[in-house]
Image: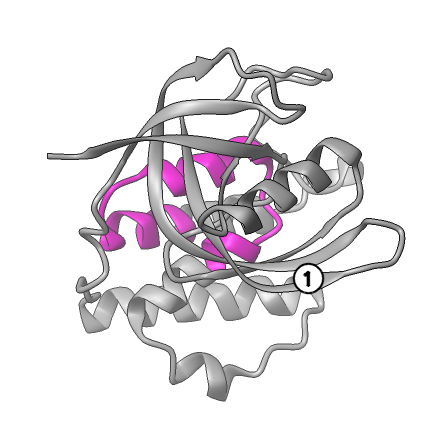
Amino acid sequence: MAETKRISIFPLSGALLFPGMHLPLHIFEERYRALINDAMARDRRIGMVQPKTAGDIPELFDVGCVGKIIDIEAMDDGRFNIVLEGVSRFRIIEEIDASTAFRQVRAEIEENAEQDEVLASAERAALEIESRKFAELQGYQVDWDSIGRLDDTSFVNGIAQIAPFDAASKQALLEIDGLSNRAELIIQLLEFFGRQDGDEGRVTLQ
């Protein structure tokens, strides 16, 4: 049975976090400085979730990821540099009417069922081939020897987290269940975003 918890959240478009992955963040807004101070006084955990809409209080996607602050640098002016480590996905049940400057939700915490999953050799090979094509097209310098030593979960979720897809595509990668399914979706997105559309530049799904 999934656990239900109160989570303080940091809505940030395009910044995805997966269980087991790391995400560096620079915290400068006053309300999110308060969020970090509160988290450090509690359990060092915050919820990363993407906003669906613009504005000061945007509508949120239902699924995000709890991150644990594993490294923090406090600056003299109150800003922070932090590194989050993904703990588990969560699904928002409802937003809490909180008195804090930052938003809080009641959410269902998912079990990390994917942590022991592996890809078939053909699935891994297909993802590596498509990743190389995309990297070459974009002009990225990649240490493929190091990539080759990653376990399947780190490889798949690492691409999903850092790939330059639009917010809707990245959210789909977070929400999809199963490592093989996520790898297949990544391949489709790499092919899609790798195409050029004449003078319009790279296409997006939005």
Q: Which of the pair 153/64 is nearer the observer?
A: 64
Rendered location of residue 154, percent (x, y): 38, 67
Question: Could you say where residue 55 lies in the image, as x and y percent from the top left?
Answer: 72, 16
In the image, is 83 to the left or to the right of 68? right
Residue 151's spot in the image, x, y percent?
Answer: 31, 75
Q: How is the image coloured?
A: one colour
Instruction: Judge whether residue 125 can be spotted in this image.
Output: yes
Q: Is most of the magenta stretch helix, strand or loop?
A: helix
Q: Residue at x 18, y 62 (%)?
A: 117
Q: Nearer the viewer, residue 195 or 73?
A: 73
Task: Give the residue drawn at x 43%, y 32%.
Answer: 7
Furthest toward the right, the residue is 77
Q: Residue furthest bottom?
A: 145
Toward the front, the furthest residue is: 41
State the extent of the magenta-drawn residues as a range.
159-187
- In the picture, measured across the screen, residue 48 lies left or right of residue 20, that is right
| Residue 173 located within the stretch drawn in magenta | yes
> x, y percentage for residue 80?
74, 54
Q: Amino acid at mark 1?
A: Gln
Residue at 51%, 32% in the rendered image = 8
Q: Which residue is mark 1?
A: 138
Quadrant for the C terminus, please: top right
The reply to whether residue 61 is in sight is no
Looking at this rendering, what residue extends furthest in the top direction?
97
169 w.r.t. 178: above or below: above
What residue appears at the point 68 percent right and 70 percent down from the top-left corner?
140
Q: Determine whether the residue tagged by mark 1 lies in a helix, strand or loop.
A: helix
Picture quarter containing residue 157?
Answer: bottom left
Q: Residues within 10 Å of mark 1 (few under 14, many from 20)?
A: few
Label count reads 1
Q: Is residue 32 magenta?
A: no
Q: Is residue 152 above or below residue 204?
A: below
